[in-house]
Image (cartoon, coloured by chain):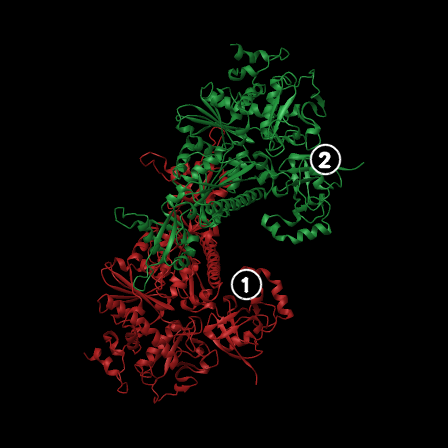
Chain colours: A red, B green
Amino acid sequence: MTKKHNIILQPSGRRGQVNEGTSVRTAARELGVDIESICAENATCGKCIVLVEAGRFEKYNIDSSRENLSPVGTEERAYLERRPKLLQSKGWEIGQVRLSCQARICGDVLINVPEESRGNKQIVRKSAGNRAIEVKPAIRKYLVSMAPPTLERPIADWERLAKGLETSMGLVRGGEENLPRWYDFEIDYACLRTLAKTLRESKWNVTVTVRNDREVIAVQAGYHEDSYGAAVDIGSTTVALYLCNLRTGELLAAESEMNPQIVYGEDVMSRIQYAIEHPDGLEKLHKAIIATLNKLLKQAIKSANISLRATAKRSPTDEEAASGNGQERHRHDIKADDIHEMVLAGNSTMHHILLNLHPRDLGLAPYVPTIHRSVDVKAREMGLHINPSGNIHILPTIASFVGADTSAVILAEEPHKQDENWLIIDVGTNAELVLGNRKRLVCTSTPTGPALEGAHVEYGMRAAPGAMERVHIDENTLEPKYKVIGVEGWNTDHAEFAGQVKGICGSAIIDAVAELFRAGIVDSRGKFRKNLESKRVREGESGWEYVIAWEQETSIGRDIPITQQDVRQIQLAKAALFTAARTLLKRSNMESPDKIILAGGFGSFIDKEKAMLIGLIPDCELDKVYAVGNAAGDGARIALLNTEKRSEIDAVARTVERFELPTDPEFQNQFMLATSFPHMSEPFPHIAHLIPKRKADPLAKNFMKGKDA
Amino acid sequence: MTKKHNIILQPSGRRGQVNEGTSVRTAARELGVDIESICAENATCGKCIVLVEAGRFEKYNIDSSRENLSPVGTEERAYLERRPKLLQSKGWEIGQVRLSCQARICGDVLINVPEESRGNKQIVRKSAGNRAIEVKPAIRKYLVSMAPPTLERPIADWERLAKGLETSMGLVRGGEENLPRWYDFEIDYACLRTLAKTLRESKWNVTVTVRNDREVIAVQAGYHEDSYGAAVDIGSTTVALYLCNLRTGELLAAESEMNPQIVYGEDVMSRIQYAIEHPDGLEKLHKAIIATLNKLLKQAIKSANISLRATAKRSPTDEEAASGNGQERHRHDIKADDIHEMVLAGNSTMHHILLNLHPRDLGLAPYVPTIHRSVDVKAREMGLHINPSGNIHILPTIASFVGADTSAVILAEEPHKQDENWLIIDVGTNAELVLGNRKRLVCTSTPTGPALEGAHVEYGMRAAPGAMERVHIDENTLEPKYKVIGVEGWNTDHAEFAGQVKGICGSAIIDAVAELFRAGIVDSRGKFRKNLESKRVREGESGWEYVIAWEQETSIGRDIPITQQDVRQIQLAKAALFTAARTLLKRSNMESPDKIILAGGFGSFIDKEKAMLIGLIPDCELDKVYAVGNAAGDGARIALLNTEKRSEIDAVARTVERFELPTDPEFQNQFMLATSFPHMSEPFPHIAHLIPKRKADPLAKNFMKGKDA
């Protein structure tokens, strides 16, 4: 009998057992992960590069090691030796990199498939909102012209510049002693080092970049109008970066990447665990995120320059011509050195790892962050590739599991300025909730698991081409129809649809579970009914399941079902989220919020009626439920463009009250009640008409209340 | 005929031509530079290590290279391969290091003899003064005890500490909005990184080091009373470091080293030139000084710990016992991390090189520094091995050739608080002069050449054992007597004196020239008289000379003369100094200063009467001439111990008026007149009685005025 070994593929989380001797690329394809190759597996194109991660992975109960792959052969070695720069630029170790078409499995392995090798590139659905932000940046530029020094007036370069800057800024003498204002100006040390050269090369005409009207952080020869900054939301799964013009507020590029820390753990708890268990764990996690931020910066600069050049080439519109803008606006390419400021948001664990602070105490009772208030660090100290004198501003954390991402969400949505009580839910692997108004804000958080994002679901996948994104089940025939990302319309609409489906993404899972419940296929406890007249409801390998797509409809050549286990995952996730919301409402003596705001990419794509039907969110008027997209990213952008907003959110974050759910005595009880659809003991008047009235459902009478009343 | 090659030995500056095949150690000994060896030149002890510097040395007109020494042999290679750590710790490159007993000369070489290899270790005479300094350091320590976090009160570590610190500092709420004061506290990023661990390990009892009552720069477990700081004066020749207790002001150790930049040029102009001509010149100079500062820090910590341990061991005095001090005071050894602050002074070139600022424009008209105002940089940015969160404060510069050393001297001597007009002269390779009182201060500088420090004088040497330090010549017999460093009394007092003299140091050169003039051996123009009845006055190889020590009195087996060329060197140096002083006096409409203050090691050892006799300093009452030692070092210590003094000197430095001598139209003319002893056109009433009245002196009548009047 052929020996079998475990293989785990990251970041998708796909896992399985494969025969000894199978190539990594083949094994991956068998598990639904496409890896590119254009050389017909001849070890020459390098498109199929993968990374083997060495170590014990408790979660999967495997010991992965480089020796568990066949030794590097002649052709593979030849390829790798031709590309030292590629490896170096990615920060990959030579022994860690394999060509997946060559490496054969001879033991358990955890394989990381880098983005460039993936057959289907991710579409990350977080996109920057377009809300109006008042532009009051920390960074301003001033043109300063000076008389050159002479033997008679040999005043030093800095003092000459500072005096000139005072004039350019239009400052007047102040203070009791009537001292010149420029005495208070400061210059960043790295900037000072190039000052003498720049002043002389520019013939004493320079553009000075000033931070907070006080610190000179750049001096450039000649005239430069624009300053640039980057806002970043570091999610556990996705990192999104927005490159902005700090003068105009214009969004120049939005780029995103998977969070590379995912190979060390899918959720924050497992990454904290990884940092605790490995002496170099924090260092690895920290370096991984810094490298990704630098990659995103590079990509964003490239994208921005491409579109700026395109804008510059085309003829100006009448309006642009009239305003003198348009063609003339973008004469220079943006360089990394032109970016002078970054603002970052992320949950507390991402925040700590970013700052190279050990996240240990975030994960151990009493769950304490190292710092709440916002942190400012020089770019060069963080190793971020913007101007080395630039400032990195990291938004404040609120609690151990309510991080700088929630601060950013608050800044974007402004519940602290409302009369109404708003419930803001930022859904991710971890969900953070904020409830309240101008008088009081309370917050909490709960792990929801990765099910809501399509992971840990049998055929779950991220939102990418081939992923099912909408599901409808006819309650009479029990037949489904579905939509797939990248394909127009419903699958029942046209024939060429067949063979397109690969898996189910987060929004379709909510849809599917809600539809299973609405159609009476699962009961309010989440159990499959067994005597239904449909061949789609069947007992599969791992229990009862409902087949959404038959083998021939898919690109993977297998039936795609929703299983009992999948339903169970969704129940646990939604119960956690609901209980957290209920706890906040109770602590605030409220029955229901005036408005529900769903933040995060996930919230933008779920059907809010179906989310309410399964009890993912509390009952509320449906037109009072809003999805606002990546509000954390928006908040980071707001803080980037408007420096006053930074003190505002620092002050608000200090006043938000935090509740840790495990300390709530009723938590376990509430959680159990909340696992039912939509809830064991709460009426859901706004979606009651959707709740099936089957007598067979032992709990159905509870749900009828709302509708019959 | 045997080929001859040039060898230059640094830092002594000794040079000569030696036969091809001579070992470096032998060549050095021939030129008066002792190099240690305890293995009888068997390449095993390594005491004779030297460094060969590669490159073009314009000043000596040689191209030095590693290939101009014999290849490394088996024994030498074996030794060097045994000691990789030694080489690494010194920052020496493997190819640069040679054993001088093995390396034979086969071409021109510039050899650097490191301090550890020198036969006679330097005694650097700069020593810290003992003036009273009010202790108001930037750094203070506070003991903070906190309640540990709980699930109910999970406030973050930093906020918990900051609140506790507010209490410990006894601060009350302030400001209009009545916000807690701790909102304004900041924490250094490097310090933040270890905060969580330290708080928990200490069980929430820590000592917090705060800078300027605002920035937390260190958190240590438990109670720590003392903070430490270092003050440094970077001279072109000598670097002196003082380690102080910032709480008590106590001086714990004073260490000094040769400035290692000396191999790149003896004076500031040649170092500026080196930085201009070599692409990596600045980097080399900068790294050299940083390495030396780190070496001095290490030495000072070691010395301080040795003496603190000695103090701790002995029984406490009654007084100490009564005060509870004494034995208990020094329980912990000082570590590099305990040093939280450094203050540095140095001339503008040393200042720029220290900060890694290119010194180009200091040396090119219109002679402009990059910055006047004081600079604060984190220790970790400078690569200085104190606490990485510690601050490096560099005192302000006044002009291109009046640097932070002069700022320090002003701070130490406080001319800006006097009614009298003081003339302060800081004598070194470059001399800086400040004149004035509380109403007005003017300054200038002049290169004096290295002659005043014993270099560029035929048998000149630095103040070290074996150096002649005092000279007296009987005006009737023309016979000399002298004193030697390290030997008691005059040479004429006892017989065992013979064989001790090696050379002449700075103070003895002034003595000797003054005595040659007083005894009528040289005339007021500095020319040797040729018809004198003394075999000591003779025509030597390079012109007329006066033999101070006969061959048999010396350890080098050669007569030691003062030559016409030596007298000329002193004339040029003193003319420059005198003209600078006269220019300042004239610009301030003064005839003479009320007081003359000689700063710098040199000033402490010269005979002020003889200095006046040769016209090195202007005429003045002799008891109004003071030598204050290393005032620059004292000023740096004052700024280290008292943070208010930093703003004081920043403000004063801005008001000092600078005159560049070359822009003075009368400079050349004045300089020529000032080359005579004591001066061609000025009366010197206070030393007129010492001026010889020989008729043969064509100019003597001028000098008589003062005495005869």
State the residue position of label 2: B17
Residue at horizontal 27%, vertical 82%? A692
Determine the image quadrant of residue B557. Answer: top right
- Would you call the spot at circle 2 few (<14 residues within 10 Å), some (14-19), or many (20 or more)? some
State the residue position of label 1: A92
**Mark 1 on the same chain as mark 2:** no
- Chain designation of label 1: A
Q: Pointer 1 and pointer 2: residues touching (CB < 8 Å)?
A: no
Pick whichever, B288 or B128, lies toward us: B128
- Image x and y of residue B258, in percent: 57, 39
From mark 1 to mark 2, how far is it between C-alphas? 56 Å
Residue B430 vertical placement versus A274 (above, below): above
Question: Going by the picture, which residue comes out furthest to the left?
Answer: A709
- Image x and y of residue B648, in percent: 39, 35
Q: Is residue A418 in sight in this rendering?
A: yes
Q: Secondary structure at mark 2?
A: strand
Q: Secondary structure at mark 1?
A: loop
Pick whichever, A65 or B432, lies toward us: B432
Mark 1 is on which residue type?
Trp
Pick whichever, A149 or B195, lies toward us: B195
Mark 2 is on which residue type?
Gln
- Image x and y of residue B231, in percent: 47, 40
Answer left or right for A452 relative to A13: left
Quadrant for the C terminus of chain A, please: bottom left
Q: Is residue A155 in sight in this rendering?
A: no
